[in-house]
């Protein structure tokens, strides 16, 4: 069975993740498939979704793909990071149609999309602190562009899921519906409205918005300091403990070493 399927409805492309056995985890293979579906097309609008009725939209980065050899677990060259950049760089709007949980890198992915339409039961969580993974600066900047600073801090520091209709996510989730059937209809309605308007205008405006909301260049000393902090985290005993606890299905015991 393919990891994802694509279908075109007129000038709208629908990309559906179809790997429920792995909770649509963003493995390197899944990330490559989704990136290809985005970069190889030129629709007026694209809808990114899971199959109807799922409890997990995507579980985020596939833990089995995280390195344990002391290298950066979220390197710039990672297929998952490439996918997030592809969503942002796409010259057409991308709608995340979310049912179930969007966790970890999948939460980052939905926040990278131009619009989010979600069922009322959908949840969003960013969970690197549960695994000892040091999140990358671009990903943090992405969150700061999607939610207020205090909400981003709560999400990162607690790793607790927020429901789609939470006041914390007001202004982040564009539209909320009650069930999967309504989700499909609402996402298509919005996509059709976008597709009916001037594509070159929308393309230029999206590019302008991206340019205006990109993280500002930082001093080399600051960048080196952040890299040093991240390196200390991904080479720590806590990182190894976080991965071990995940695979052993137990609570992690972090020591700060």
Image (cartoon, helix red, strand yellow):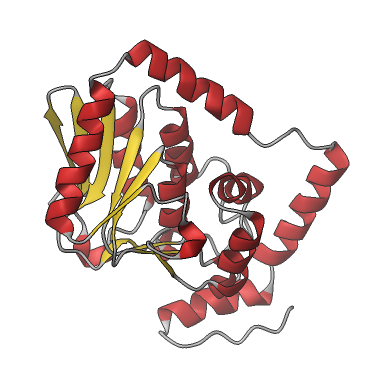
Number of numbered discs:
0
**Residue nearer the viewer, 243 or 59:** 59
Q: Is residue 179 left or right of residue 154?
A: left
Q: Nearer the viewer, residue 231 or 55?
A: 55
Q: Is residue 27 visible?
A: yes
Q: Nearer the viewer, residue 144 or 227?
A: 144
244 to 22, vertically: above or below: below
In this view, the residue in front, 161 or 71, is 161
Q: Position of residue 145 (x, y in %)?
A: 58, 44
Does 24 sit above or below residue 2?
Answer: below
Q: Residue at 24% of width from left, 32% of height from top? A: 191
The image position of residue 196, as x and y in percent, is: 23, 20
Q: Residue at x 46, y 61 (%)?
A: 104
Q: Position of residue 182 (x, y in %)?
A: 16, 52
Quarter that holds the C terminus: bottom right
Q: Please state if 140 lies on the left or on the right of 91 as rendered.
A: right
Q: Identify the image quadrant of residue 178.
A: bottom left
91 left or right of 238 in image = left
Q: Is residue 15 visible?
A: no
Compared to residue 153, the image places residue 198 above or below, namely above
Q: Position of residue 180 (x, y in %)?
A: 16, 57
The residue depicted at 63 percent of the width and 46 percent of the height is: 141
């Amino acid at each position: 069975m393919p990891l994802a399927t694509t279908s075109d409805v007129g000038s709208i492309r629908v990309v559906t993740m179809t790997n429920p056995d792995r909770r649509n985890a963003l493995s390197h293979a899944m990330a490559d498939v989704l990136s290809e579906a985005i970069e190889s097309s030129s629709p007026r609008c694209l809808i990114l979704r899971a199959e109807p009725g799922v409890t997990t939209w995507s579980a985020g980065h596939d833990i089995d793909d995280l390195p344990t050899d002391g290298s950066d677990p979220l390197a710039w060259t990672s297929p998952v990071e490439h996918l997030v950049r592809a969503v942002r760089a796409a010259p057409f709007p991308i709608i995340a149609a979310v049912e179930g949980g969007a966790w970890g890198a999948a939460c980052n992915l939905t926040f990278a999309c131009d619009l989010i339409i979600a069922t009322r039961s959908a949840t969003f969580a960013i969970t690197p602190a549960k695994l000892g993974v040091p999140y990358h600066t671009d990903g943090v900047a992405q969150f700061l562009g999607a939610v207020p600073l205090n909400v981003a801090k709560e999400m990162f520091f607690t790793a607790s899921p927020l429901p789609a209709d939470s006041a914390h996510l007001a202004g982040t989730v564009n539209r909320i519906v009650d069930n999967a059937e309504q989700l499909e209809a609402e996402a298509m309605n919005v996509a059709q409205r976008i597709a009916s308007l001037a594509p070159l205008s929308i393309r230029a405006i999206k590019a302008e918005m991206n340019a205006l909301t990109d993280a500002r260049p930082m001093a080399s000393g600051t960048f080196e300091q952040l890299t040093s902090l991240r390196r200390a985290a991904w080479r720590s005993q806590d990182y190894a403990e976080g991965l071990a606890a995940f695979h052993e299905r137990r609570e992690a015991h972090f020591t700060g070493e």
